[in-house]
Amino acid sequence: MIRLLIFIVATFFFLRISWRALKNRRTHGFYRFFVFEIILVLVLLNHPYWLLDPFTPLHLLSWTLLLVSIIFIFQSIKMLRTKGGYGERSTMPENFTFENTSRIVEEGIYRYIRHPMYSSLLFLAWGAFFKHVSLLTIILVLTASGLLIATARVEERENILHFGKDYEEYRKRTKMFIPWLF
């Protein structure tokens, strides 16, 4: 019962912060909302298993992914705030304020990957998944991964429209989610 209550409260929170994006399927925030929801379900489904046998190989992998997720999110927010500047984007009113950077951030983690916040969500999803593997969680984590790729691709189209060739060049120098790999 408590997990259902957490799901309802968190869903209302995600709806509140994503409301504008949910009205426009062509924005990255539309897809990101569903990623938030799927990760929430993964965490809530697998929560009872988080501390059972915490030193098994799958749990150690899970803890590693969860730690990397935390590092990526803090590093990316710091870089956006300190290096991104702020630029009003009237063509993208659905964006969160911190997403409306006036410059392409290419320092810190952004030197290696274009979407560290989505990487953080990807690692969070897989970290939660490895706590307890089942057919349902396999479907959920693969769906979340696909939606994160779709989210990133939509955001890249938005960034190309906003930053032009500079962003296209940046894309050629960096990976999408995982440094040196993908």
Image: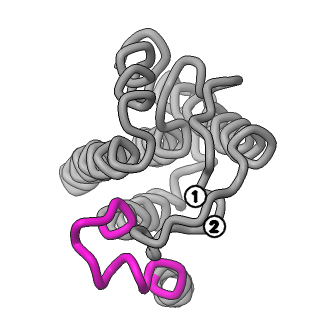
Label 2: element kind: helix
Residue 181 x %, y %:
38, 13
Whether pointer 2 and pointer 1 mark residues with C-beta atoms closer than 8 Å, the reply is yes
Q: Quadrant of the C terminus?
A: top left
Query: Vertical placement of 145 versus 24: above or below?
Result: above
Q: Which stretch is magenta? A: 15-30
Give the crowd class for mark 2: few <14, some 14-19, many >=20 residues within 10 Å.
Answer: few
Query: Vertical placement of 57 versus 48: above or below?
Result: above
Residue 168 x %, y %:
35, 27
Q: Which mark is residue 97?
A: 2
Residue found at x 37% / y 37%: 164
Residue 47 x %, y %:
53, 60
Q: Quadrant of residue 53?
A: top right
Q: Nearer the viewer, residue 140 or 150?
A: 150
Residue type, mark 2 in image: Thr
Magenta highlight on residue 16: yes
Residue found at x 44% / y 28%: 166
Q: Which mark is residue 100?
A: 1
Query: Vertical placement of 2 versus 83: above or below?
Result: below
Residue 139 x %, y %:
19, 51
- Label 2 to label 1, Cα distance in Å? 6 Å
